Amino acid sequence: MFRPLDWLLGLFSLDVGIDLGTANTLVYIRDKGIVINEPSWVAINRRSRAPLAIGAEAREMVGRTPADIIAIRPLRDGVISEFEITEAMLKYFITKSHEQMIVPFPRPRVVVGIPSGVTEVEKRAVYDAAISAGAREAHLIEEPTAAAIGAGLPVNEPRGSMIVDIGGGTTEVAIFAMGGIVVSRSIRVAGDEMDEDIVQYARNKYNLLIGERMAERAKIGIGSAFPLPEERTMTLRGRNLINGLPQSVEISSIELREAMAPSVNIIVDTVRDALDETPPELVADLMEVGICLAGGGAQIRGLAERLEDVVKMRVWVAEDPMTCVARGAGRVLENIELWERSLAGLHRGSTHH
Ligand code: ADP
Ligand code: MG
């Protein structure tokens, strides 16, 4: 049905997709692409808990702040542990992306990707934050669904498709058919845990204390989940735990693979478990289309090969895997009726503005 008012509003409307990730928050605006990509960090005053800095600025403060300022990641474990702080963060990013527009007045329609498993109270908080940040309409969608839509999977079709979204704090596995999730798993093992594995490994094997950022650099630099065509080395820098002095250690990609194995194995087992629970008809579909990997962790070298080796089906990395959730959330706004079944409740437009 042609609705002239909707059509007219559509000409001026600003459609915003937001990925409220445990590690990074991304904002996607239709026709503009990704306009914000910042760490999900908030620096707060320890006593008053008032937010002092958000995003990249807050992350820069980590380890450099006076004692009364602490930097936190409100979505770290895939749940909104501090929703007032999450609210401040969401408001800040919506306002900031809105300010980037030449004509900032039409209030945006927003779809926010939220970790699966958040409570009704937390959903309400995200929804209210979006509305109070000036959204004309707000909808919530579970991250794996948004990731699958962003990756171009046919989630609305009868045939099955599967996404494995490996973020910082959580890995989400979901198998879709006919617009719904048929089987899902959400675990608190993802990229951050791999960094911690590396910190432990350096401590146990070399008595070397390294920071999380050093560990992450090693993971991104030479980390892997499957033997590499050419193994590599890099230098880890930290402090010797015995004498307290600065120390560098040359580490190989083979050692790093061993270091990351505990987390990688849990992710692999979770994918296998989810497949075990999938009805055979859908498994047959998956054998045709394969399994899609998204999120920052999808970029770990050899992860797709490792999974292929275990589950014996094709595994592929989505195009631009770190932006899938934001782009998927944005795409939902192109045709909200089409995706109605994929939304996570609490998605009425605001009427009190
Ligand atoms: P979230 O959705 O939880 O915010 P992201 O999808 O943004 O998380 O992914 C962040 C994680 O991806 C971090 O653990 C980061 O270290 C990891 N990551 C980013 N780039 C790479 C890479 N090239 N190789 C391996 N891991 C990566
Ligand atoms: Mg994510």
Image: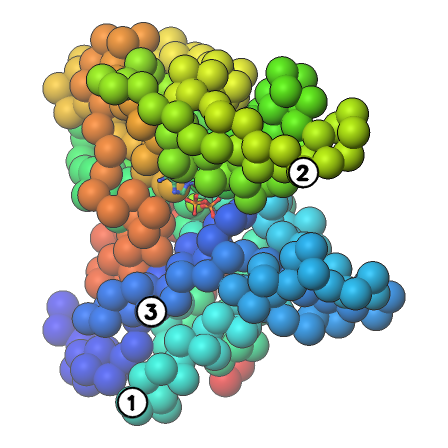
Q: Nearer the viewer, residue 115 or 140?
A: 115
> Residue beneath label 2, please?
246
- In the image, taking residue 127 as reference, residue 145 lies left or right, namely left
Q: Name the residue that disc number 3 marks.
A: 35
Dot 1: within a 10 Å radius of its alpha carbon, few (fewer than 14), some, or many (20 or more) residues?
A: few
Place of residue 139 in the rendered image (x, y in percent of width and height, measured from the top left): 42, 61
* Residue pictured at 13% horizontal, 19% vertical: 288
Mark 3 vs ligand 1: CB under 8 Å? no
Say which label, 2 or 3, has the lower sequence index.
3
Instruction: Please say if 168 is above or below 112.
Output: above
Rendered location of residue 5, percent (x, y)? 22, 83
Mark 2 or mark 3: which is in front?
Answer: 2
Question: Is residue 256 toward the left or the right of residue 156 in the image?
Answer: right
Asked which secondary structure carries label 1, the reply is loop
User: Residue drawn 36% across and 88% down?
Assistant: 104
Side of 291 relative to 255 (left or right):
left
Residue 210 in percent (x, y) is at: 63, 35
Mark 3, other Cα within 10 Å: few <14 / some 14–19 / many ≥20: some
SS at circle 3: strand
- Residue 313 drawn at (x, y percent): 21, 14
Amino acid type, callout 3: Val
Residue 206 seen in render: yes
Residue at 38% from the left image edge and 30% from the top image edge: 222
